[in-house]
Image (cartoon, rainbow, N blue to C red):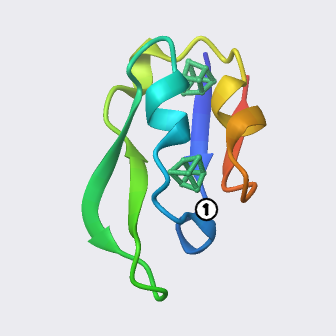
């Protein structure tokens, strides 16, 4: 089973990961981190195929992928 973890404090809400995830796993949530960014959260975790695209594309290293 694949699982991702978003490190909320690192996210700057650029949405690259949301755009490039092939499975629609990620979305910007309503919660705000200490820097004022609405961070990304998994909304469809079950669909994740652990392709690591999100982790590779994130400029801030805010996503970790586990298999
Ligand atoms: S590992 Fe792939 S499928 Fe899973 S959330 Fe990241 S981009 Fe989407
Ligand atoms: S790519 Fe990284 S910084 Fe950008 S929205 Fe996704 S988790 Fe946040």
Residue 2, image x, y percentages: 62, 21
Please state, as top left, top right, bottom left or bottom right, where the C terminus lies in the image. top right
Residue 18, image x, y percentages: 44, 34
Residue at far bottom of view: 34
Residue 43, image x, y percentages: 31, 35
- Which residue appears at 66% of the width and 56% of the height? 62
**Nearest to the observer: residue 39 or residue 14:** 14
Indicate whether 30 appears above or below 61: below
In which quarter of the view is residue 37 placed? Answer: bottom left
Would you say 60 lies left or right of 18 here? right
Would you say 57 lies left or right of 9 here? right
Residue at far left of view: 30
**Nearest to the observer: residue 49 or residue 57:** 57
- Which residue appears at 52% of the width and 22% of the height? 21
Indicate whether 64 appears above or below 20: below
Would you say 48 lies left or right of 39 here? right
Give neighbour class at mark 1: few <14, some 14-19, many 20+ (Cα, 10 Å): some
**Residue where numbered disc 1 is placed:** 7
Please state, as top left, top right, bottom left or bottom right, where the N terminus lies in the image. top right
Would you say 9 lies left or right of 28 here? right
- Which residue appears at 45% of the width and 59% of the height? 13
SS of the residue at dot 1? loop
- Number of marks present in the image shown: 1
In which quarter of the view is residue 52 placed? Answer: top right
Residue 29, image x, y percentages: 28, 55
- Which residue appears at 38% of the width and 20% of the height? 24
Indicate whether 16 appears above or below 1: below
Q: Is mark 1 within 8 Å of ligand 2?
A: no
């Amino acid at each position: 089973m694949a699982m991702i973890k978003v490190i909320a404090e690192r996210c700057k809400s650029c949405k690259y990961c949301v755009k490039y995830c092939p499975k629609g796993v990620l979305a910007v949530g309503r919660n705000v981190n200490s820097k004022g960014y609405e961070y990304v959260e998994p909304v469809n975790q079950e669909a994740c195929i652990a392709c690591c695209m999100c982790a590779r594309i994130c400029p801030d290293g805010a996503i970790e992928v586990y298999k």
